[in-house]
Each structure stands twice: as structure tokens, then as C-alpha cells.
Image (tube, grey):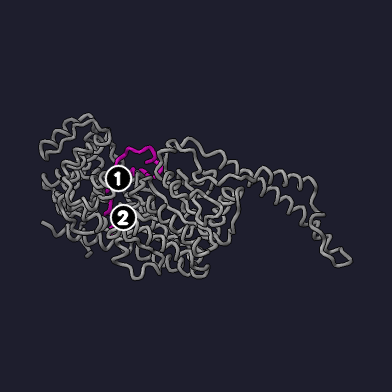
Amino acid sequence: MSEIKNAYLTEIAWEVCNQVGGIYTVIRSKVPAIMEKWGDNYVLLGPYVHKNVAAEFEEITDLTDHYGKIVQKLRENGMDVHYGRWLVTGMPKVILFNPYSVFHSLDKIKYLLWEHHSISSVQGDGLLDQVVAFGYMVKSFFWELAMLDRKANIIAHFHEWMAGTPIPDIRKDNLGVKIVFTTHATLLGRYLAMGNPGFYEHLQYMDWAKEAKHFNIEAQVNIERAATHGAHVFSTVSDVTARECTQLLGRTPDVILPNGLNIERFVALHEFQNLHKIYKDKISEFVMGHFFQSYSFDLDNVLYFFTSGRFEYTNKGFDITVEALARLNWKMKESGINTTVVMFFITKQPYHTINPNALETRAVLEEILDTCENITKQIGHRFFIAAASNPENKIPNLNDFIDDYWKLRLRRTLQTWRTSSLPLIVTHNLVYDAQDPLLGYLRTANLINHRHDPVKVVYHPDFITTANPLFGMEYGQFVRGCHLGVFPSYYEPWGYTPLECIASGVPTITSDLAGFGDFVVKTVDTPEEKGIYVVNRRTQNFHDAAEQMANQMLNFVKQNRRERIKQRNRTEAASASFDWTVLTKYYDEAYEKALNSV
């Protein structure tokens, strides 16, 4: 966008310095590209409610700049307001509001919201109370900003309904603030799509008011609709979600703001192929512990697939993934392909403990490794001396150099190691094992880790961290160690997980019902060559889409190692198209529209 004198850009979101979901990633990763254009005329507003805020926030004590003066005014009015910098790349200025500091006026704030905008928020909802109080404080900030510099061009970009309550009042008071409102997913859409395979077919017939009452979210939906219709520019993140907005919010978005990443954070230059091997070997250590006590397979001819994210069985496409894996399993056996595929489901479900067998096999494997390393050390020097001093130039017998102690220890360890049981499907003891839909479908599909099946499954109902005793690695490292990410979502307004895959040089499967997949179809030439496989879920039924997905997986499996390396190079290169330095042009368009609006 063209240079604008005396202009301020403010972004308001519940997830500023407050990691709840994907919006946190959107805003945090976008900061460096926005700071490059706006500098210190850019500030973010968020709530001071999360206990971990202090870890991401550094206070500014000098209140002499224009934001500092406003903070001082708000404090004089009895508000608990914090001014500082967000400790992320770019170090943007942030102002955080403690909504509890105005709770003594909450009844009055709610009354005015009803009186002026017919939004009832009387229900006793703790989050809603915080949101309403936060909105009142944010509106006060814009009042002070407008009064401080009446000639300023002020752009306020609000994200999601939880930040949207100030919008109707800002318009009512004619503060001269130009408003952009972005819904990343409609609130009703999230509720309606959950477990509803006919969501898109039924969308045009849905009565938003009736559905909001049914789910007891009338206040939240009314806030979202008021923000939508009060904005000068209304936006969402994908064409997929735009159709949802038109029906459920009553306004078609003016612009689409696709999500990107700060790709520089993922760049490993020529090292990313080496990193893949390093982390793949760490995953292989887990696989040995998990499978090899029952049977073994060639680790040089194994592919690691994975999916991850919140446990939304239908929305995230876990159901179609299992169906496609079952078909892949059959196709690989029919074709005589001797590759092994290990599919990891990394999600979050209630569990009691890690399965003791999973921990025990890991511990025994460590014991085998330790014993073998000791034997290797013992053999090494003795073997060297015997070989060098052998007058007949004969190769000595290795068994002659191992102490009986180590032989016995290794034999006993191996005896405790072997089992006739099948490897576990799930690594933890689930609280609701019998009701778990993913586990149930795996059992129904007979994907229970038989020796003769080329497709194996590991269901890990917890996120991966370095503290995890089974993997002992970061999630990002795990991603780099895998060969294919699998995310064929049914409902996904955008979808960061496949984008994070390609930024790490890992090919991925997505769907055209995910915002990211829809964007790829419309903007990327020959995406499969670049390692981005898009499943058509918009016009195909479940079984046809599963068949397409199984064939995409099969084609991937059939690639040789050199072809996979070439594809990873193309995948990593393609990620540059999704860097914020490229995608902020869509934001520039939104801000230009807002400034030119009446």
C-alpha cells in the first residue's frame, strides 16, 4: 500500500501474548513483516489474563510516546493496563488490559451493550464476562487515541468475536477509526460442523438465530454479527470460510486474508535434508522399541506418515485417513510392495497413564543398546591387537573377545525382550477407550499392526515435547523426521499444520475443504510436483475421496529415495510462496479499502 502519513495500525486479538489456538500463530508469525512497514506506529492489544503472559512480555516504563500517554490516562481512570514489547521476532509494542480491573462496572457495561446494540450478555459465562470487560477497555483506548491526535489515520484490525465488542461503540461514537474485522472461523460454523458430515450441503438452509439459541451461544453470535456489520472492511481467511460467513453472518467478506508463516524460522538451507535424516533416526529408535519385540522390518525401507492437531475426529479428517490407510494397506499387498508405512496419529485425548508396556519395551531397548555398546568397546581394542599381531594373517573370531558376562547379559535381555503379542495401537491407557472413535475405526478396519500388514499405526494421544519419555524430541523435530504429513480436513478454515510441513521440506496431504488446500488449488501450479497433495472433498463423497487419497499415498510410496529427495527440495522451495513478506499484500489491500471507506 502507498505510504500514509500520521498513520497508526492497531491489531486487537484475544491471543496476543496468549497462546490458545491458531490465531496466536497467525499474529505472532506476521509481526516481522508488519513491523517492517509500520515500525513503532504498529501496536497490538490483548488481554492480561493468562498466567504465562509474563514469559512473553517485557514492560516499558517510559510512557512519553503517544501509546505511553494513553496508557497513563487509562491508568488514571482506574484501569490495570500494561505497556511493553512482545518477546517474539520483531519485538512489537503491545498493550495488555486486565479485564478484572473494570469488573466493578461490569453490570453497567453489559447494560450499555444491550441498550445501544441489543446484545444481551446477562448469562453467567466467565469467558464472556472477560470479553465484554476487555472490549470496554479497548474502546476506551481508541477514544483516547482519537482525542490525542484528531488528524491521525487510525486503522484498527480486530480478530474474532472475542475482540469484536468495541466495534459497535467505535462506530456509534464516530471516532474516525477505520475498522477491519477478520473472522478466522465463524463461531456457529465450528459448532455446526462438529460431527456433521452434511454441514456444507445443509449450510444454505440453516437459520443462524435458531442454531445460536440451540447451542446456547446467542450473545457470542450476536457480538460476532455486530462486529461483522460494523466493520468498514470485513474479511476472512479463505474462500471456503467466506461461503460460511455469507450464510451465518449475513455479509460476504470484502477481502480474503490468507495465513502465512515467517518462513525464515524454518529455513535450514542445505541442512534440511541432513536434519531429516537425524530426526528420522530418532523416530526409528521409537519404532524399534514399539515394534521389534514382536517382529522386525527393514528400517532402510520404511516411511513415516503423521497427522496432528486437536482431536476433532471428523473435522480434522481422522476418519477418512483411517479409511485411506486401510485401502493403501490392501493396495500395497496386492502390488507386492515391500515398503513399510508407519502412520502416527498425534493428538490430545484424556488418558490415565502411558501404557506400561510401551515404557517397558523402550527401557529394554535401551538396555540392549547399552549392552551392545559395551561389547563393541570391549571387542574393538582387543580385536585390533589380535588382528595386527596375527602371524598367519587370519581374521580372528569375534566371539573370542567377548566376556561371558556380556554374552549372558545380552542373552537374558533378549529373552525378556521378545513377545508373541502384537505391537500396541495406542501408546497410552485412554480414559474412554471403548468410546474412542479413532481407536474403534482402527479396530474395525483391522489396522491393528499385524506382521503381514505393510501399514502400521501408532496412536499417540498426547502432544510431542522433549519431556516425552517415548520420543524425547520437539514437535518440529518430529515433523522434519517424517516423510509425509496427512491433513485431509473436512472443516478447516485455514490449516497451519500442512503449511508447517512444507516449510520444513515435508510433503503433505490437505483437502480442498481446508482454507490452505483451497488456496493451493487456486494459486499453485502442479502442486503434487511440489509435494502438496490436495484431496477433492468438495465434490466427491467420502469413499471416492478416500480412494483418491489412498492412490496419492500409494504414488508417494512408489517413489524411490532419489525421487523423494528431489520432491522434498521442491516442497521446501515452494514454501517461499507462503511467507508473510508475500502474503501481507492482501492485508495492504484491506487497509487501503478501510482508509478509503466512508
Taking the magenta stretch, the answer to whether it contains residue 39 is yes
- Amino acid type at circle 1 is Met
Q: Position of residue 469 (x, y in %)?
A: 54, 43
Within 10 angstroms of label 1, few (less than 14), some, or many (20 or more) residues?
some
Q: Which residue occupies the extreme top position in the image?
A: 104
Q: Position of residue 192 (x, y in %)?
A: 25, 45
Q: Is the N terminus in the top left, top right, bottom left or bottom right quadrant? A: bottom left
Q: What is the CA distance from the residue labelled 2 to the residue labelled 1?
A: 16 Å
Q: Position of residue 8 (x, y in %)?
A: 23, 54
Q: Which residue occupies the extreme front position in the image?
A: 334
- Amino acid type at circle 2 is Trp
Within 10 angstroms of label 2, few (less than 14), some, or many (20 or more) residues?
many
| Marking on residue 194 | 1
Asked if residue 63 lies left or right of residue 155, the reply is right
> Which residue is painted at 72% across and 50% down in the image?
374
Q: Which span is picked out in magenta?
A: 36-65
| Marking on residue 494 | 2
> Which residue is painted at 44% across and 44% down in the image?
439
